Image (cartoon, rainbow, N blue to C red):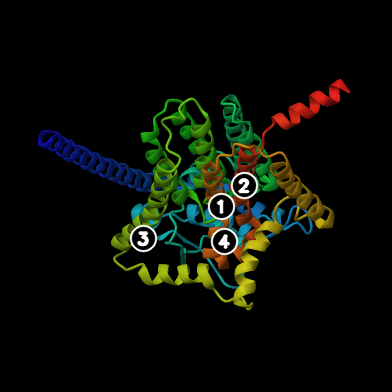
Amino acid sequence: MWIRGQMKLNKGYTDCRHKGKSIFKNVIMYTGVFAAGIGVMILLLVLTALIPVSAIQDNMQESAQYLKNCELFGTVIDGAEGSRIDRYADSILLGIAYQYDEENPLESVMMSSYYHTSYLNENDNLYQAVTKHPAANQQYMRYWHGSTVIVRPMLMFMQLKNIYFFNAVMVAILNAALIVMIIRRKAYYAAVGLAVGYIAAAVWFVPYSLEYTWVFIIMPVAAMCAVRSCDKGRWYNIGIIFLLSGMITNYFDFLTTETVTLSVPLLIVICIGMNGRYKESFSPVKIPVKAAVTWTAGYAGTWCAKWITASAVMHTSMLPYVTEHVDERIGGDIGVGTVQYITGAVVNNIKCLFPAGYGKAGVWLFAAVILFIIYIGYVYHSNDICWHSIIIYGIVGLIPYARYLVLHNHSYLHCFFTYRAQIATILAMFLITGSLVDWRWFADGAAKRTKS
């Protein structure tokens, strides 16, 4: 007995040592990937800044003229907030890309300056910067503005309208490819849910603005990489995929619908992992937690890396500046009560969904679809329900609303684009319905109707 006890003790000690080594290796691996990623991000920005202004002047001038003739926050469809296009952010982005300093590229990309006046809107400010060439006088250091590594080189060959078109093609191809990939894995609920989510989020308006576009390119790429990892049963890759997804999202995104690059790929991974041929090796708790933690670490860490790098390069602390803007996004004063402020952040985003944002008929149609889904799940429910999958889908599907509540100022004011994060909620709703419903009810009903 003593020998058996000693053997168990030694085995436990050995397991702990192996586990400790594994954790240490993972920490080293993730840290290395993160550090390498930040290095590549800085290098790409510096190389972008080295492109001569003369190489982009003509296309930049045509782009500035185009934006000058556009509304700053115009709607494509009158009265539909979900169709509102943000030219303000695009003008700032182009202004930053235009006014990078070739002689001091590192300082320039860290400062991210552009020309600004308070008496003109940003579209007119950009036009003045491109045609009159005043010095940049407004910094935008808190973001990476990584999208300039795509936009500035593209401006060597095409103007903004053509970039919009190119982005539209990329968004369509990548998101269609993701749906096809899901269908081929027989994850039909996920495919239908994602398609309906795209419709509800009016994804056809996304390419109208550079600001909206990046997450709809990052998200399908991250999801397809995750699906490929599921195919091979390589669950150890999930952490790296979501770490890089969080990093790249922070690098490109302008705080729009950043959570979709976490929530949508994660829901697809859970769906395929729990129902695919590798479901025995899939951990329904460990893997989602790992994905969420690594994505959050990548996203938040990349933001911190920008602030630290900018502080070091500019020899000044960014903390007061960052703190001020964080406070504003969380709880700036817009003249409404606290309860109305917080609930409005959620309600306004829901109201922007298609077709709810398109008049009374749209509201009734939207409500009818939701009630129909609930009805199907309740009436045709299975007797063998996998509750833990439903709980996991529900938690991930609520991520957009957690974001709306935390950043309620930003979500309240910018609901016309933040609402698209609810693609994940709609996808989760379909996955939950798929977990609840026993489709043999429909098969039996159809058989009875055929016989009669």
* Alpha carbons under labels 1 and 3: distance apart: 21 Å
Q: Which residue is mark 4?
A: 404
Residue 274 at x, y percent in the picture? 50, 34
Point 60% across, 58% down: residue: 127
* 1 vs 2, front mark: 2
Q: Are marks 1 and 3 in contact (CB under 8 Å)?
A: no
Q: Are marks 3 and 4 in contact (CB under 8 Å)?
A: no
Q: Could you tell me if residue 41 is visible in this image?
A: yes
* 3 vs 2, front mark: 2
Q: Nearer the viewer, residue 41 or 358?
A: 358
Q: Secondary structure at mark 3?
A: helix
Residue type, numbered disc 1 = Thr
Q: Nearer the viewer, residue 179 or 64?
A: 179
Q: Which residue is mark 2?
A: 423
Sequence-wise first label, 4 or 1:
1
Q: Which residue is mark 1?
A: 257
Q: Which residue is mark 3?
A: 307
* 3 vs 4, front mark: 4
Residue type, numbered disc 3 = Trp
* Alpha carbons under labels 3 and 4: distance apart: 24 Å
* Alpha carbons under labels 4 and 1: distance apart: 11 Å
Residue type, numbered disc 4 = Tyr
How many residues crowd mark 1 within 10 Å: few (<14), some (14–19), many (20+)?
A: many
How many residues crowd mark 4 within 10 Å: few (<14), some (14–19), many (20+)?
A: many
